[in-house]
C-alpha cells in the first residue's frame, strides 16, 4: 500500500494523544484511589474539558502557521515538543502531588496538557484528510481509533501490569524480585523521550505535502481567515441532522459514563479485584480490541448510523449489566478472595465490552469522516469531534457528585431509565440519517459564497 508509511505515522501521532488520556483517566485513579475520594477523582477527570471546547481555538490552528515550515507541521511539531516537556516534568512530580492531595493543582496541569493535545489533534485530523490518497481516505478514522487505543493500552493495561510486583514475578522475572519493571516516573520519562525522538523525525524528515495534491490545491485550502472560519462553524452547528445525532449520543452515552470512568476503580479498590489480574485480562484482549476497530471500520461504511445505533444499545446494556449485576452481586470466597466464577464473569464481560466499545468508537469516527464536507474538512471535523467529546463531558459535570450522594447503583439505574426512553423516542429519526444525501451534511453554498467574498 502506497500510503502505508503515512498511515503508520498518523497512528503513532494519535497514540501520543491516547497515552496521557489513559494515564490521567484510568491509571492514576486506580493506583492512587487510596489517597482520593470519588469527588476528587471527578475533579481530576474534568481535565478532558479542552476536548469539548477545542472548536473555540480550532480556527487559530487553521489560520495561523508558518508557510515555509508547513500548515500542519507548524502546530504538530511545537505541540509534540511541549507534550514531551510536560511528561518529563510530571515524571518527577505527579506522585508526590497525588499523595499530598494537590488535586486542583494537578487538574490545572492536566487541563493545560490536554489543551496542548487538542491543538495537536486539530492539526493531525486535518493532515489525515490531506495526506492520504482518495482510495485510502477511510483509513483516517481507523488510524485515529487504533492509534488512540494503542496509546491508552500502553498507559493503562500494559503499565499497570508492569508496575505490579506480583505480575512481574509471575510473568516477567525468572527469579522473584521486590521492584516492578516500571515505576510511574520511569514510564513517563521513557515516553517523553520517545515522543521527543518522533517529533524530531517529523521536523527533519517528513514532508507535509501530499503526493496527490497540486500546489494550487494546497494554496486554495489555506485561504480562510478567522471570520470566515467562524461563519462556517456557525452554519455547521445549525445543521438539524448534526443536532439530532448529538442529542441521541448524549442520551445514550450517559449509561456508559459510570462504567467507563469509575468501573475499573470501583472493581479494583472497593471490590478488591486484583489490579494485576485485570491488567492481564486487558493485555490479552489488546489484539482483539485493535482487530475489532479494523473490522468495524469496514462494516460501518454502508449504514453508519444504523451501525452506531445498534452498538450504542449494546454498549449501554453492557455498562448497565456491569454496574447493576456484576458489581451488585460480586462473589468472593470465605477467605475474602475473588471467586473463580467471578473472575470468569469479569473475563467474559471484558471480552464483550472490549469488542463492542471498539466497534462503537470506530463507527463514531467513521460517521465523522464520512459526513465531513471536504471543502472545509479541518473546521468540520474539529466541530464534530468537539460535539462527540462534549456528549461525554456533560455527564462528568454531575456524575461523580451523584455517585457520592446516592451511590453507584441508583445513579446507574436513573441514567439507564432516561436512555431507554431516549432510544425509543429517537430511533426512527436516527436511522433516517443513513438515507440522507451527502449534501444534507454540507456547509450551505450561500455561506461558502459569503466566505469567498470576504
Image (cartoon, rainbow, N blue to C red):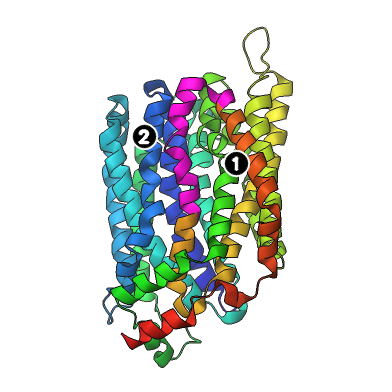
Can residue 131 be seen?
no
Q: Is residue 176 above or below residue 281?
A: above
Q: Alpha-carbon neighbours of circle 2 within 10 Å: few (<14), some, or many (≥20)?
A: some
Q: Is residue 422 left or right of residue 118?
A: right
Gap in angstroms between the C-alphas marked 2 and 1: 28 Å
Q: Position of residue 186 (x, y in %)?
A: 36, 40
Residue in view at x 59 percent, y 73 percent: 440
Q: Is residue 225 left or right of residue 294?
A: left
Q: Is residue 427 left or right of residue 234?
A: right
Residue in view at x 34 percent, y 80 percent: 224
Looking at the rendered structure, the secondary structure element under dot 1 is helix
Per the image, the residue denoted by label 2 is 43
Looking at the rendered structure, the secondary structure element under dot 2 is helix
Q: Position of residue 228 (x, y in %)?
A: 34, 76
Q: Alpha-carbon neighbours of circle 1 within 10 Å: few (<14), some, or many (≥20)?
A: many
Q: Nearer the viewer, residue 374 or 251?
A: 251
Residue in view at x 52 percent, y 21 percent: 407
**Magenta stretch contains residue 396:** yes
Q: Nearer the viewer, residue 425 or 82?
A: 425
Q: Give, as a single range, the part of the protein colored magenta.
A: 388-410
Q: Which mark is residue 283?
A: 1
Q: Nearer the viewer, mark 2 or mark 1?
A: 2
- Quadrant hosting residue 31: top left
Count all numbered tags in the image, as a single digit.
2
Amino acid at each position: 500500500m502506497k500510503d502505508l508509511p503515512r498511515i503508520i505515522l498518523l497512528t503513532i501521532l494519535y497514540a501520543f494523544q491516547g497515552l496521557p488520556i489513559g494515564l490521567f483517566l484510568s491509571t492514576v485513579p486506580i493506583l492512587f484511589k487510596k489517597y482520593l475520594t470519588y469527588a476528587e477523582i471527578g475533579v481530576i477527570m474534568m481535565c478532558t474539558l479542552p476536548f469539548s471546547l477545542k472548536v473555540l481555538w480550532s480556527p487559530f490552528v487553521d489560520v495561523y502557521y508558518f508557510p515555509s515550515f508547513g500548515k500542519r507541521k507548524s502546530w504538530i511539531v511545537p505541540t509534540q515538543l511541549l507534550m514531551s516537556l510536560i511528561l518529563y516534568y510530571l515524571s518527577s512530580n505527579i506522585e508526590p502531588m497525588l499523595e499530598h492531595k494537590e488535586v486542583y493543582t494537578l487538574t490545572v496541569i492536566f487541563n493545560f496538557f490536554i489543551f496542548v493535545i487538542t491543538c495537536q489533534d486539530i492539526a493531525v485530523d486535518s493532515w489525515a484528510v490531506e495526506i492520504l490518497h482518495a482510495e485510502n481516505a477511510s483509513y483516517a478514522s481507523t488510524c485515529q481509533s487504533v492509534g488512540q487505543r494503542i496509546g491508552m493500552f500502553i498507559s493503562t493495561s500494559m503499565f499497570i501490569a508492569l508496575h505490579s510486583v506480583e505480575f512481574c514475578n509471575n510473568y516477567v522475572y525468572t527469579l522473584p524480585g521486590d521492584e516492578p519493571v516500571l515505576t510511574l516516573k520511569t514510564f513517563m520519562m521513557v515516553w517523553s523521550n520517545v515522543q521527543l525522538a518522533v517529533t524530531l523525525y517529523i521536523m527533519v524528515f517528513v514532508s507535509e505535502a501530499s503526493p496527490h495534491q497540486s500546489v494550487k490545491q494546497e494554496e486554495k485550502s489555506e485561504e480562510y481567515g478567522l471570520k470566515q472560519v467562524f461563519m462556517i462553524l456557525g452554519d455547521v452547528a445549525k445543521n438539524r441532522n448534526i443536532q439530532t445525532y448529538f442529542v441521541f449520543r448524549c442520551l445514550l452515552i450517559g449509561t456508559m459514563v459510570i462504567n467507563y470512568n469509575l468501573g475499573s476503580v470501583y472493581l479494583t479498590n472497593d471490590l478488591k479485584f486484583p489490579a494485576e489480574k485485570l491488567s492481564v485480562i486487558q493485555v490479552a484482549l489488546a489484539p482483539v480490541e485493535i482487530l475489532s476497530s479494523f473490522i468495524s471500520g469496514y462494516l460501518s461504511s454502508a449504514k453508519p448510523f444504523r451501525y452506531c445505533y445498534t452498538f450504542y444499545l449494546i454498549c449501554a446494556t453492557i455498562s448497565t449489566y456491569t454496574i447493576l449485576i456484576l458489581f451488585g452481586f460480586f462473589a468472593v470466597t470465605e477467605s475474602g478472595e475473588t471467586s473463580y466464577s467471578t473472575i470468569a464473569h469479569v473475563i467474559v464481560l471484558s471480552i464483550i465490552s472490549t469488542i463492542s466499545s471498539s466497534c462503537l468508537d470506530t463507527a463514531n469516527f467513521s460517521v465523522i469522516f464520512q459526513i465531513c464536507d471536504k471543502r472545509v474538512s479541518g473546521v468540520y471535523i474539529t466541530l464534530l469531534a468537539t460535539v462527540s467529546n462534549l456528549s461525554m463531558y456533560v455527564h462528568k459535570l454531575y456524575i461523580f457528585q451523584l455517585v457520592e450522594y446516592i451511590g453507584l447503583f441508583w445513579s446507574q439505574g436513573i441514567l439507564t431509565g432516561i436512555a431507554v426512553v431516549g432510544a425509543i423516542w429517537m430511533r426512527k429519526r436516527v436511522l433516517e440519517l443513513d438515507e440522507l444525501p451527502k449534501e444534507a451534511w454540507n456547509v450551505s453554498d450561500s455561506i461558502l459564497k459569503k466566505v469567498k467574498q470576504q
